[in-house]
Amino acid sequence: MRIIFMGTPDFAVSSLKALVNAGHELVAVVTQPDRPRGRGKIKSPPPVKETARALGIPVFQPLRIKDPDFIELLRGLSPDVIVVVAYGRILPLEILSIPVFGCINVHASLLPKYRGAAPIHWAVINGEKETGITTMYMDEGMDTGDMILKESVLIHEEDTVGTVHDRLALLGSQLLVETLQLIYRGQAPRHPQKGMPSYAPMLKTEDERICWGRPALEIFNHVRGMNPWPGAHTKLRGRVLKLWGTAFQEDGFAGAKPGEVVSTGRDGIMVGTAKGILTILELQLQGGKRLDAAAFLRGNPIPEGTVLGSENHAGGEPC
């Protein structure tokens, strides 16, 4: 099949490679413009662009997805199908109507749950026990099209958003190849989405901040749902402190305040919450390296009674 592939981040790379390996004709790759990245804010190409160039596939990076000249370019490529995997923009009807077999999306959730930009992050943050991949026919809505294939994966307590991301990227590439085979044979099903949808909006800066006025289990899920990107953080003596690994217990120290350090040692830094105790196992102080708790404490002792966080949300939660 003649395919135009639209995608941007690492998540989409597995799908792009799978299409090439399956013998499809990739006539073009469309991805987001180069953006500043890293500490030096150096303008860098998205992962999909780097992969496409290595595979010898023409790359286009329109500033405006609705640009008439760009739409005419796509139309002139005469694709059988347009495949969209984490491209980052909603396609207009003018593009959706171009391919013979329509536009197919690979979405990292079990639709209609977690429509939107950050489904993997929010599934882990919310403590879900499973998530998955859905392939679907695209329409003008945000992840609202008829579903083709769906497959679930478990989210284990030791998982982070990074480990779930990698499993879903691989699963997504497999389901995409299977989906296109069904479409080519005229055997692809169309299942309307049923049930109450939920949403996974793009992460904002305030979503990274830990609120100690929440139960330890919620904070535990928050930390692993931000690992390895963008990182959940609190404040220690006015400096940003990122937490990378934690454990929790439902019962706590009597009288421990939310955010209060109640014990430190080789086993971690124990902090009070609204319900239970969060034990910090791996952390990183602003300007420093990621360290396990024991190594961190050797250079940065934290007296018991220290209160982490210094700001409050509008709702009054200690953060």
Image: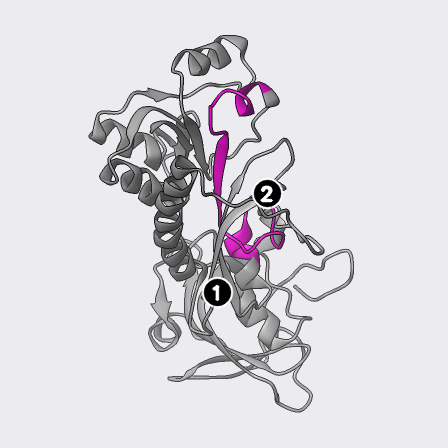
Q: Quadrant of the C terminus?
A: bottom right
Residue 224, numbered circle: 1
Q: Closer to us: mark 2 or mark 1?
A: 2
Q: Position of residue 78 (x, y in %)?
A: 40, 16
Q: Position of residue 35 (x, y in %)?
A: 42, 29
Range of magenta residues: 94-122
Q: Is residue 288 magenta?
A: no
x 66%, y 81%: residue: 275
In the picture shown, does residue 308 fall above or below 248?
above
Q: Quadrant of the N terminus?
A: top left
Q: Quadrant of residue 68?
A: top right
Tell me if mark 2 has few (under 14), some (14-19) or many (20+) residues whose alpha carbon lies within 10 angstroms of its own: many
Circle 2 residue: 146
Q: Is residue 111 magenta?
A: yes
Q: Is residue 197 visible?
A: yes
Amino acid type, callout 1: Arg
Q: Is residue 237 visible?
A: no
Q: CA distance from mark 2 to mark 1?
A: 32 Å
